[in-house]
Image (cartoon, grey):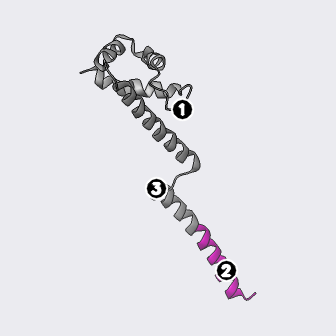
Amino acid sequence: MKPETEVKVKYGAWGLILGAGVAMIVGFNWGGWTTRGTTQQMTDQALLAARAAICVAQFSQGPNEQRRLKDLKAVSSWERATAIEKGGWDKMPGEEKANDAVARACAERLEPLMAK
C-alpha cells in the first residue's frame, strides 16, 4: 500500500470511530434515543398509570361513590391499598388478582377526590 493511501485509511478509520462516538453521545443525550432498560421502565410506568386510571374509574362507578370515598378516607393511608384490593377495584377485566402497585397507585389517585 502506498504511504499516502495508508495515511488516508488511518485518518478515515479514526474519523469513522470518532463520528460514531459523537453520534451516539448526541443521540442518547439530546436525540431521544433510549436503551432497552429505559424503554421497559417507561412502558411499565405507562401501563401502571393506565391501570390506576381504570381502577379509579371502577371505584367511581356505581351508587354510593361518596360513601365509599368517606370510608376510604377513614382508613389509614398505608392501608388504603389493601382496602382497594378487598373491594376488587384494582382488578382489570379478566384478571383474578391485580398487582399490588396498581392498588397503591389507585389509592394515590383517589386522594384528591377524598379531599373534596
Q: Whole-Å distance between the Cαs marked 2 and 1?
A: 62 Å
The x, y position of residue 37, in whole percent, is: 57, 45
- Mark 2 Cα within 10 Å, few/some/many (few <14, many 20+)? few
Q: Quadrant of residue 2?
A: bottom right
The residue under label 3 is: 32
The residue under label 1 is: 94
> Where, quadrant-wise, is the N terminus in this rendering?
bottom right
| Nearer-N-terminus badge (3/1) | 3
Q: Is residue 12 magenta?
A: yes
The x, y position of residue 14, in whole percent, is: 62, 72
Residue placed at 39% from the left, 16% from the top? Answer: 77
Residue placed at 55% from the left, 44% from the top? Answer: 40
Q: Which residue is at the far left?
A: 116
Q: Secondary structure at mark 1?
A: loop
Q: Amino acid at mark 1?
A: Gly
The residue under label 2 is: 9
- Marks 2 and 1: which is nearer the front? 1
Task: Give the side of residue 102 with respect to residue 60, left or right.
Answer: right
In the displayed structure, 80 sits above or below 32; it is above
40 or 87: nearer the viewer: 87
Q: Quadrant of residue 87?
A: top left
Q: Secondary structure at mark 2?
A: helix
Residue placed at 43% from the left, 28% from the top? Answer: 105
Q: Secondary structure at mark 3?
A: loop
Q: Amino acid at mark 2?
A: Val
89 or 12: nearer the viewer: 89
Q: Which residue is at the far right?
A: 1
Q: Amino acid at mark 3?
A: Gly
Q: Which residues are magenta?
A: 1-18
The x, y position of residue 73, in whole percent, is: 33, 14
27 or 66: nearer the viewer: 66
Task: Give the side of residue 90 with respect to residue 13, left or right.
Answer: left
